[in-house]
Amino acid sequence: MLASLAPPLLDWLPRQRWFAGKGSPVTGLAPVTAVDLLPLGPPGGAPGLLHLLVRARQPGTGSDDCYQLLLGVRHVLPPRLAPALVGRPDGGPLRGLAVYEALADPRLAGLLLERLRVPGRLGPLRFAREPHTDLPAGLAPRLLGVEQSNSSVVYGDSYILKLFRRVGPGVNPDLELPRALARTGCARVPAPAAWFEAEPPGATEPMTLGVLQPFLAGSADGWRLALDALAAGDGFTAAARALGQATAEVHRALAAALPTVDLDPPRLERIAAAMRRRLDVTAEAVPALRPYRDALRAAYDELTRPPGPGRPRRAQRIHGDLHLGQALRTAADGRWSLIDFEGEPARPLAERRRPQPVEQDVAGMLRSFDYAAAVGRAGTEWAPRAREAYCDGYAAAHRDPREDGPLLVAQETDKAVYEVLYEARHRPDWLPVPLSAIRRLAERADGVRRP
Ligand SMILES: Nc1ncnc2c1ncn2[C@@H]1O[C@H](COP(=O)(O)OP(=O)(O)O)[C@@H](O)[C@H]1O
Ligand SMILES: O=P(O)(O)O[C@H]1O[C@H](CO)[C@@H](O[C@H]2O[C@H](CO)[C@@H](O)[C@H](O)[C@H]2O)[C@H](O)[C@H]1O
C-alpha cells in the first residue's frame, strides 16, 4: 500500500510544521506499521482511517526518524476538507482515492476517542486508560490550529489528545512525568486519562503515540498573556512570580516521585561536553553563531569548576523545554499549570529522560521572558524584572536558582544555542532574537575570561 502512497507523502511530509528533519531531503519512506483503524466504505459510505508509522530516509543525517501519520481516505473529498488533502495515489489499492490528514475530519478524530475509551489491542497498537476516569462518548472534536511540534485534538472542551509526530522506542516523558506527578497528588499538571502506543515487530520497547488529558478550558498560555500585558503596558511581575512558584512546586514533586542523582565532576563534565557539542553542531549549521563560539565555550568551562562550599549540585527529572508557551493560566482562579513534558523535541529520547539540573528549566523560562520582550518590543526593564520575579517566586517555594550562577548561565547559554538552531530551521525571521542573547552572553563570558 505504501508504494502508491509514497510519492504524495514524500511531497507532503517535509512541509508539515511538525516534521523534524527540515534541512535535509527525504529520499524515501519505509513502512514500520500500518493499521486500518476504519476500513473505507462504499462511495457515499464511511471514510477510511489508516494509521501509519513510517521511517523517513534522510541520508547523511545519521538517523532515519519515524513519524506517526493518521490518514483519512475518501472517494470524494468534501470542499471543507480540501486543505487537508495529502494527494491521490495513482496506483495500488488507493488509486484515485483522496488521502488526507485525518485529524481535520471530525468523524475520524471522533473515532480515535472511541478507541481510547475502550482499552485493548489492535495489531501493533495498544490503547490504555486510567481505570477510574470517566470518558464520555460523543464529545465533538476540533483540531487545534496552532503551529506546534505535534498535533492536538480537543474533545468538547473536556479533553485534549496530543498525537506525537516523531516517535521512537521508550515511554515519552509527556506521558511518564504527568503520570508520576499525578501519583504524588501534584495538581499543577493535567493528569493523563488515556493513551496509546505501538509495539512494532521486533521492537524492544513500546513507542508512545498519543496522550489524552483534561483540557483546561478558559485558560491562556503564558506567551499570549505576556504579549497581551506588554501591549497593554501592564506589568507581568506578579504573574512571573506565581509562575516561578508553580515551577518550583512541580520540580519538588518530580524530585519526590523519581530518582535524583548527585552532579559529581564526571557528570558535570559530560553535561559540559554535550553543551560544547551542541554549540559546534549549531555553529556549523548557522554561520552567524561562529564569531561567538570561543566566548560561549568559556561559560561551559566555568560549569566544570567546583562550586562554592555548601552548594551541592543535584540532577533530577525536569520539564526539559520550559517556556512561556508551556504554562497555562486559568482565568477563573489565576492558577498556573505546566504542560508538554516531552522535552526538547530535537534531542534523543534517552537523553531527554536523563536527570538534569532544575536550572535547565529555569533558564528556559528566563529565555522566554527575553523572547517576549523582543517580540512585544518592551523597554529594557521588562525582561530583567520578569526574570527576577520568576526567580523570587521559585526561591520562595524551593531554593534560589540564582545561587549557582555558573550553572544557570551555562544552561541559559545552551538554551540560546538551541534556539538559534530552532529558529534557523523553523522561523528564520526570528533568528535575531536568540542571536541578541548570544551576543550578550558572549560579552559576559568574555568579561569572565578577561577580568
Ligand atoms: N491540558 C490542556 N488544556 C488546555 N490547552 C492545552 C492543554 N494541553 C495543551 N494545550 C494547548 O495545546 C497546545 C499544544 O500543546 P503542547 O503539549 O505544547 O504540544 P506541542 O508539543 O505540539 O507543542 C498548547 O500550546 C496549548 O495551547
Ligand atoms: O513546540 P514546542 O512548544 O515543543 O517548543 C518548540 O517551539 C517553541 C516555539 O513555539 C520554541 O520556543 C521558543 O520560542 C518561544 C516563542 O514562540 C519562546 O517563548 C521560547 O523561549 C523559545 O525557546 C521551543 O524552544 C521549541 O522547542
Image (spheres, rainbow, N blue to C red):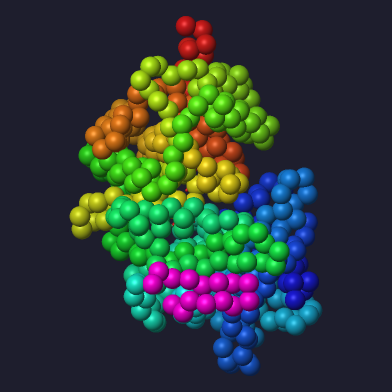
- Does residue 123 belong to the magenta stretch? yes
Residue depicted at x 46% and y 36%: 261
Q: Position of residue 191 (x, y in %)?
A: 36, 60
Q: Position of residue 373 (x, y in %)?
A: 37, 36
Q: Is residue 324 left or right of residue 79?
A: left
Which quadrant holds residue 200? bottom right
Residue depicted at x 53% and y 27%: 268
Residue depicted at x 46% and y 58%: 175
Residue depicted at x 58% and y 47%: 350
Q: Is residue 335 left or right of residue 140?
A: left
Region of the chain picked out in magenta, as a range? 117-131
Q: Is residue 376 left or right of residue 121?
A: left
Which quadrant holds residue 183? bottom left
- Does residue 286 belong to the magenta stretch? no
Q: Is residue 373 above or below residue 137?
A: above
Which quadrant holds residue 101? bottom right
Q: Is residue 267 above or below residue 422?
A: above
